[in-house]
Amino acid sequence: MDMDTLFLSRLQFALTIGFHFLFPPISIGLAWLLVAMEGASWRTGNPVYERMSRMFAKLLALTFVVGVATGIVMEFQFGTNWSEYSKFVGDIFGAPLAAESVFAFFMESTFLGLYLFGRNRVSKGIHWFSILMVAVGATISAFWIIAANSWQQTPAGYIIQNNRAELTSFTQAIFNDSTWLRFFHTFSATIVCGAFVVTGVSAYWALKKKDMDVTRRSMKLALIVGFIASVLTAFPTGHEHAIQVAKTQPEKFATMEGLLKTQTRAPLLGFAIPLDNPPRLIGAIEIPGVLSLMAHGDINAEVKGLDAFAEDERPPFFLTFVSFHNMVALGTLFIGLMAFGLFLLYRGVLWETKWFLAILVAAIPLPLVATQLGWIVAEVGRQPWVVYRLLRTADAFSPTVSAGEVLFSIVLFGTIYLFLGALYLFVFIREVREGPVEESVEEVTV
């Protein structure tokens, strides 16, 4: 029964955090793109940027509301399904979550209200400043959440006392070995998400011949930003993060790279079909020495394989390996799509290349898939630990909650999330189909 409760508790957390994590990347990415759009509107006075900003502001507001609603449910689970975890890390984990609420969420939500309802009621400068603060607040919020999760990956600034982790240095705990690299990698990925929303929506408008003045400018902005962010997500942030994982979580690194045996001149897998129980690879295509070079800067360096770790300390092989490699494949695809889009734009044939515009529309959700895969690599790759080498996941769930109770809540949340997801898509698609609408409202300056 305990193992059933553990499995269902993990399944519920995966469901709630996975659904919630669909929305913050869009919110952050869209907010920063709106900073650029509103800045152009303020600087040039061109009504085209005004119509563009109004349209994407609606999508930002919709995404923000659903993200807040789903985030509240996620945090409650720490006290209900993971009481032993909460007891063990409450002294540490609570600090960044409190900081996120006090210093980031309230700023983000307050300025979002000013941004949405202050248009034409405050000056252009104040209105631009409000969306800037929304973007900054959302980014700071992401930092605190990532810092808290990074402590689970690379704990620091604590002592174990009275069978719990107690904070000794707030600075060391927050700025642990993985925080900054994970933050920059995740932040650049959110910009990719926002850029793909804008390129996809703009491509749809281009296919429907809707307000081509707005469409041309929004597409150009998103292609440039999306290309830069896609490159930065892969290199240096993704590459440096992988090096950090190789140093601080070598069993995760071996699992996601599919390195079964410890060896020098470790090869990089170009292709392989992974199998579990025991971990093995079929049809592996390897590039000798490249993994050693990438991980340690030395082609002859030794890289630990899965054989260096006890079986009960290895992460699940298949899911971690497949998630990592598909994330990398998608990241490569994003660079290619954005680069090709810029090439077509430069040649002046983008708007006639309907097949590529259709691909951009279909590609809107792909960065979200990539972020979900990245989350799976981070969390499943940390197993069997909920706090790396300090607390096992099997020792962290609530022993007083029955499997039936967890199952009931999964069904309940699943039903609610299906409704929320369908409603979100319905409103999102409706707004996009309507397209940019020119609104005439008397401007008031304060």
Image (cartoon, helix red, strand yellow):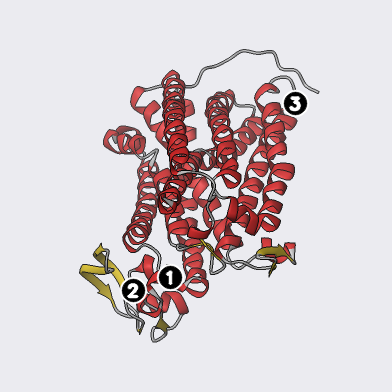
Q: Which mark is residue 259?
A: 2
Question: Badge 2, how many Cα within 10 Å: few under 14, some, many 20+?
Answer: many
Tag nearer the camera, 3 or 2: 2
- Residue drawn at point x = 49 percent, y = 27 percent: 214
| Percent of width and height locating residue 68 | 59, 34
The CA span between labels 1 and 3 is 58 Å
The CA span between labels 3 and 2 is 58 Å
Residue under label 3, please give it: 123
The residue under label 1 is which amino acid type? Answer: Glu
- Kindly indicate the quadrant of the structure image that contains residue 363: top left
Sequence order check, earlier mark of 1 and 2 = 2
Sequence order check, earlier mark of 3 and 2 = 3
The residue under label 3 is which amino acid type? Answer: Ser
CB of mark 3 within 8 Å of CB of mark 2? no
Judge left or right: residue 52 versus residue 336.
Answer: right
Please, what secondary structure does the residue beneath circle 3 have? loop
Quarter of the image containing the C terminus?
top right
| Percent of width and height locating residue 51 | 55, 23
Tag nearer the camera, 1 or 3: 1
